[in-house]
Amino acid sequence: MKSVFKSISAVSAAFFLCAVSVADAEDSGAVSDTLARTPAPTAYAGEAFLEQLQPRDSVLIADQLRYGFELKEVKAGTGFMFPDYSKGFCEGVEVVSPWTVDTVGILKGRKKSPEIMDIRGSVVITSFDEGSYELPPVHIVRISPEGRADTLSFAPKILDVKTMPVDTASFTVHDIKGQIRYPVEFREVVPYLGGALLLAAVIAVAVWLTRRYIRKKSGDAASREPAHIRALRKIDRFRSDSFWAPEKQKAFYSGVTDALREYIVSRFGVPAMEMTTKEIFDGLKGKDIRPELYEEVRELFERADYVKFAKYVATQDENASVLPSAVRFVTMTYQEEIDSEAEANKTREE
């Protein structure tokens, strides 16, 4: 007949080392010889304990509990044999975890080499049926360091297992509830808001760099054009008599004269953008400009000053002469430059 005990030996450390194999027939004989040589009287050692792993007011079905014993002042080197519940424990109650032994206190000695200690042994049990169950008493065999064996008996406990009551009179079956949706808090939105702002900033920087690159490219292309081409293109923007209306004449004359100022800067090296009309034409004296062309453009600039600063309203004939005068000044001075360069090249060749 196989033994129904497992063996556990106390060592000098602060915990117990469990032998996990169940004794077979040969082991049973060896244990029997030991108990025969040393009588094993049964002694009442108190009540077993029963406690929930998750304490609450009552025990519900499937709750897990510890059921076991406590021993005080156990000497180092004491051996124990525990009941084997692998074949069954109690009707309606099941063992979830096998025996475990813990040291709950050291009365004498060091932590790693105790001489006297308090121990606690237990199994984890549960029940899946409602009812009241009388648990079996706990019997263990204690073997002293001198080899004397005795049986310790612990009084059993009553396990009352309950279930959630159902009011059958008013009970109605409901559908499965959907997932609970909790209100969104600001701290939960902050990471997404920060990510959106960061993405917007990256997009804004990318757009700005793209536009800057395009403007730089267009500016470089425009700066490579000859001065007279740039001036004629800007002057051509005002080729419409809609600019001759009194309320638009200021923009009309400012646009044309600004285009001529830029041309004068590039063509003659006179800083016309920061000069008054008198200073500009004082700077153009002595330049290679025909006198009649010089006077025609000077009159254009003076009329523009009257329109811009003296609220003068130019006549239709005066407005009609603005673009031809500006175009003639640009083309003729540019042609004179080409002729001068050709003459210089011819002279060098001769």
Image (spheres, helix red, strand yellow):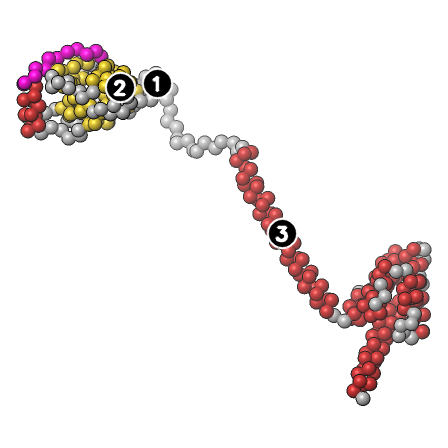
Residue 41 among magenta residues: yes
Name the secondary structure under disc 3. helix
Q: Is residue 112 left or right of residue 174?
A: left
Whether residue 85 is visible: no
The residue lying toward the viewer, choosing from 101 and 162, is 101
Instruction: Point out the tag, 2 or 3, that comes first from the N-terminus.
Output: 2
- Judged by depth in the image, the label closer to the viewer, 1 or 3, is 3
Q: Which mark is residue 44?
A: none
Q: Judging from the image, what secondary structure is the residue with disc 1 in? A: loop
Q: Is residue 201 visible?
A: yes
Magenta range? 36-47
- Quarter of the image for residue 259 reads bottom right
Instruction: Please report whichever mark, 1 or 2, sits nearer to the chain's N-terminal start.
Output: 1
| Quarter of the figure with residue 233 | bottom right
Q: CA distance from mark 1 to mark 3?
A: 61 Å
Q: Are marks 1 and 3 in contact (CB under 8 Å)?
A: no
Q: Amino acid at mark 1?
A: Arg
Residue in view at x 55 percent, y 37 percent = 190
Residue sitting at x 33%, y 22%:
54
Question: Which element type, helix, strand or loop, lies under badge 2?
Answer: strand
Q: Nearer the viewer, mark 2 or mark 3?
A: 2
Q: Which residue is mark 2?
A: 109
Q: Amino acid at mark 2?
A: Gly
> 328 or 108: nearer the eye?
108
Residue displayed at 10% across by 25% down: 3
On the image, numbered disc 1 is attached to which residue?
56
Q: Nearer the viewer, mark 1 or mark 2?
A: 2
Q: Is residue 1 left or right of residue 236?
A: left
Residue bearing mark 3: 205
x then y, percent, for residue 225: 74, 70
Amino acid carrying mark 3 in the image: Val
For image coordinates 83% across by 75% down, the residue present is 334
